[in-house]
Image: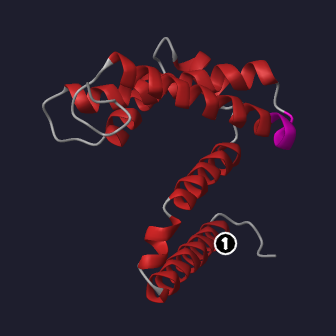
C-alpha cells in the first residue's frame, strides 16, 4: 500500500501514521523553539501545535479522499478559518492556544526540515549547474526585499514612523 506521505492518492494506515509521526516531531521541536525563543508556556504551545497538526492532518486526508483537484493548503486554510471564526464554539479555545505558537518558531523548524531535505538531494541540485545557484540566490533576495518593501509601505500607511 502506498504511503500518505509520498503524495499518492490513496490513504493508508501506515501513511497516516507517518504523517502523525512527522507532525509530532515537528510539533515538539517547534514547542521547544517557541519556549526558548519566546518564553511561551510549553503546555499551551503543545496544545496549539496539536490543534495545528490536527487541522493539517485533516486537510491532507481531505485532499486525497475527496474527488476534487484541490490542494490540501486550501482545505487546511478553510478548516482553520471555520474553527477560529468568531461565534463558532471552538473559536476562543483555538485562538487562545494557537496564539501561543509564534510563526517564526514554526518557520524556523520548517526551514531546517527543508534544508535537510535539500541536503539529501544535493547531487541533483549540483547537477543543475551554477545558473540554478544564481537564480536561487536572486529569488531569495527578491523575496526578502519585496517583503521588506511591502512591510515598510504598510507601516508607513498605518502611521508607524520609519526607522
57 sits left or right of 72 in the view: right
Front-most of 129 and 145? 129
Residue 73's image quarter? top left
The answer to whether one can see residue 26 in this image is yes
Residue in the picture at 63% in, 73% down: 148
Query: Looking at the image, how many numbered discs can be counted on the residues?
Result: 1
Up the image or down, 8 lies above or below 108; here it is above
Magenta residues span 35-39
Residue in the picture at 21% in, 33% down: 9
Front-most of 47 and 6? 6
The answer to whether one can see residue 55 in this image is no
Q: Position of residue 43 (x, y in %)?
A: 76, 18
Residue occupied by mark 1: 156
- Looking at this view, name the residue that lies furthest to the top: 89
Q: Element type at marker 1?
A: helix
On whether residue 50 falls in the magenta region, the answer is: no
Residue 67's image quarter? top left
Dot 1: within a 10 Å radius of its alpha carbon, few (fewer than 14), some, or many (20 or more) residues?
Answer: few
On whether residue 36 falls in the magenta region, the answer is: yes
> What coloring was used for the rendering?
secondary structure
Q: Position of residue 32 (x, y in %)?
A: 78, 33
122 sits left or right of 9 in the view: right
Quadrant where the C terminus lies? bottom right
Q: Position of residue 12 (x, y in %)?
A: 30, 20
Amino acid at each position: 500500500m502506498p504511503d500518505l506521505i509520498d503524495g499518492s492518492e490513496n490513504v493508508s494506515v501506515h501513511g497516516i501514521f507517518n504523517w502523525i509521526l512527522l507532525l509530532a516531531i515537528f510539533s515538539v521541536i517547534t514547542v521547544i523553539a517557541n519556549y526558548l525563543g519566546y518564553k511561551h508556556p510549553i503546555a499551551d504551545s503543545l496544545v496549539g501545535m496539536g490543534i495545528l497538526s490536527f487541522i493539517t492532518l485533516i486537510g491532507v486526508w481531505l485532499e486525497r479522499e475527496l474527488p476534487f483537484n484541490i490542494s490540501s493548503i486550501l482545505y487546511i486554510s478553510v478548516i482553520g478559518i471555520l474553527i477560529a471564526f468568531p461565534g463558532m464554539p471552538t473559536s476562543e479555545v483555538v485562538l487562545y492556544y494557537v496564539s501561543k505558537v509564534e510563526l517564526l518558531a514554526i518557520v524556523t523548524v520548517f526551514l531546517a526540515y527543508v534544508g535537510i531535505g535539500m541536503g539529501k538531494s544535493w547531487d541533483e541540485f549540483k547537477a543543475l549547474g551554477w545558473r540554478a545557484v544564481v537564480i536561487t540566490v536572486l529569488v531569495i533576495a527578491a523575496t526578502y526585499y519585496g517583503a521588506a518593501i511591502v512591510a515598510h509601505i504598510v507601516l508607513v500607511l498605518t502611521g508607524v514612523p520609519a526607522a
